Image (cartoon, grey):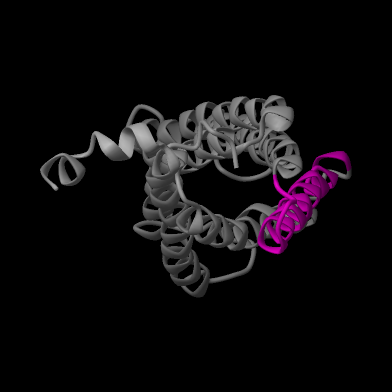
Amino acid sequence: MSATFTASAQRLGVVSACGTVLFSAAYVIPLTAGLLSLPSAEAPIGDPWFSMMEILIILMMPAMVGLMVAVHAWAAPETKVYALLALMFMGLVTVVTCSVHFVILTVTQRAEFIGQPWVSLVLSFRWLSVTYALDVLAWDVFFALAVLTAAPVFGRSRLARSIRVLLIISGTLSLGGLSGVFFDESNLRSAGIVGYAAVFPVAAVLLAILFSRARSPEDHDPVKRSSSPSRRQS
């Protein structure tokens, strides 16, 4: 644990990890309901489930960025360069995917766009479209790089090594989702979806446990302890 992992960094890490897990779990509800409502396997998920999924993704991304900020604070000096890369890649994930989902959530619902022949090629969230390709870039490339570069930060304890393994698995599966692009088959993206939607939330649970168990360096600073109100009054 780095000396930069202060009490505020600890709180941010725990809250961000829990937020990531909660939003990921909440996402399963409209996803399941939407899939069950489909008249056929080829039909897209409709509203209100689709809009709920879009909103949850946008709300989840700040928590994931905060989690990587805490990972950077946690990282030892020799691994901070990897944590910084992870934070930058997660920032790219956030910018690209939030832009994609916000545009789909707002613009595609307007009467000016409904019925336009080019909309399905640009703004629909299905393969092949521009917005879908951008989301693939966000999750199967930038997200994969984020978790893979975060993995070297962890490894000194059994819990930390478990986190490292899960991050490597998550990133590898996410990269595997790119096969859907190369073979022009959206079903092959399932590997990527498992990586970031199933494996990463488990890693976030372990990160919340790891950060909550950590004692901030401030707890071991005799100067700060002696200047606390309880010490001054005793």
Viewer-proximal residue, 230 or 7?
230
Judge whether residue 160 is colored magenta.
yes
Residue 195: x %, y % from top left: 70, 55
Report the side of 159 relative to 226 (left or right): right
Residue at x 39% of width, y 39% of height: 105
Q: Nearer the viewer, residue 23 or 41?
A: 23
Q: Is residue 161 above or below residue 150?
A: below
Residue found at x 51% / y 61%? 209
Question: Where residue 78 sits in the image (x, y, percent)?
Answer: 74, 29
**Can you say whether 144 is above or below 53 in the image?**
above
SS majority, magenta: helix
Query: From the viewer's perspective, is 74 left or right of 34?
Result: right
Q: Is residue 203 left or right of residue 63?
A: right
As displayed, is residue 92 above or below residue 163?
above
The magenta segment is: 154-182
Measuring from the top left, give residue 91's x and y in whole percent: 55, 28
Residue 48 drawn at (x, y percent): 34, 58
**Location of residue 120 by image quarter:** top right
